[in-house]
Image: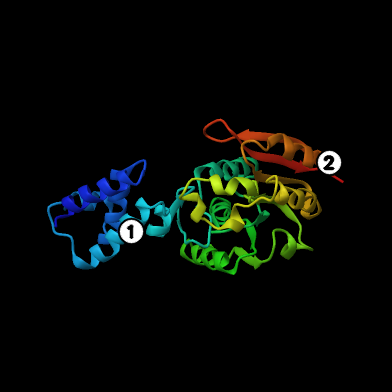
Amino acid sequence: MTLLAALQEATRRLAAGGVARPRLEAEVLLSRACNLTRPGLLARLEEGLAPAAAQFFWPAVDRRAAGYPLQYLTGHQEFMSLDFRVTPAVLIPRQDTEVVVEAVLERLHPDGEYTIADCGTGSGAIALSLAHYLPRARVYATDISPAALAVARQNARELGLAARVTFYQGDFLAPLQGLKFHALVANPPYIPAADLAGLPADVRWEPRLALDGGPDGLDAYRVLLPGGARLLRPGGLLALEIGCAQGQAVMSLAAATGAYRDRQILPDYAGRPRCFLAHRREE
């Protein structure tokens, strides 16, 4: 079978499985199977599909057609123009979360010497992006999952950031007690538990720990908002990703602490509420 014929058959299977961009994803999987870039693959479509490549490719196509996430099959996801390894142990980084990172970068000087916390780091996408774009910052990242931390540490090594990012195992803020931060960032779980079963098929493969926000989706914010106020320096920045229907609830929780000023909600690229921002009140 030629690479072109394999690509056509894979596109058919993915389309039948309801994949929105079947040709593109077929190219991505075949490129991964053949260890080629997509342009390199497209230049060789008349060549034959090697047996070793076929051993990865066809099972991967069938798993993707059944709803398994593409990023877990390729092992990679781009975020903030950086390449991150991902496994089923971590949430797949998404463009919506880039809004949170960009909001922090816009409010911190690129040459500043900051101490930053990322709570629930997963793949390390937020922590490592901030470390990359703030080269004098020191970043502390936490996650309750040892498997997620293993992925984050690997990403730190591969991105050359391991010397400036420290990882701790523990729940959100628990490992950070006694430290003080200029900024605290998190993309916590915020899906109401009752809504998990209705998520798209590929999302349901992601770690429940990274999705389940409790009965109303707000459990993590009830920890991060008061707890973050104790760890932030006066004037320090808090940036939290939120669900698109949670803006008012998170604003109310923040107001109830009495600890924050300049509270605001920023939209994502689709115009939906996505990022809660506030500064710790000065003493």
Question: Residue placed at 70% from the left, 48% from the top?
Answer: 215
**Which residue is pictured at 26% across the width and 66% down the height?**
55
Is the N terminus in the top left, top right, bottom left or bottom right quadrant?
Answer: bottom left
Report helix, strand or loop for mark 1.
helix
Query: Left or right of 267: which side holds 33?
Result: left
In the rendered image, residue 107, in percent from the top left (x then y), is placed at 65, 41
Q: Is residue 68 above or below residue 107?
A: below
Q: How is the image coloured?
A: rainbow
Kindly give the residue lying farthest to the right in the view shown: 283
Task: Label 2: state its secondary structure.
Answer: helix
Q: Is residue 253 toward the left or the right of residue 78 in the image?
A: right
Q: Which residue is mark 1?
A: 60
Q: Amino acid at mark 2?
A: Ala
Tag 2 and tag 1, C-beta contact below 8 Å: no
Total marks shown come to: 2
Residue situated in front as seen by the camera: 33 or 159: 33
The crowding category of the residue bearing disc 1, from other C-alpha atoms within 10 Å (few below 14, some 14 to 19, many at least 20), is many
Residue 26 placement (x, y as % from top left): 29, 50
The quarter holding residue 242 reads top right
Question: Residue 279 location in percent, x, y?
Answer: 75, 42
Residue 191 appearing in the image: no
| Foreground residue among 149 and 126 | 149
Question: Is 62 rendered above or below residue 157?
Answer: above
Q: Amino acid at mark 1?
A: Ala
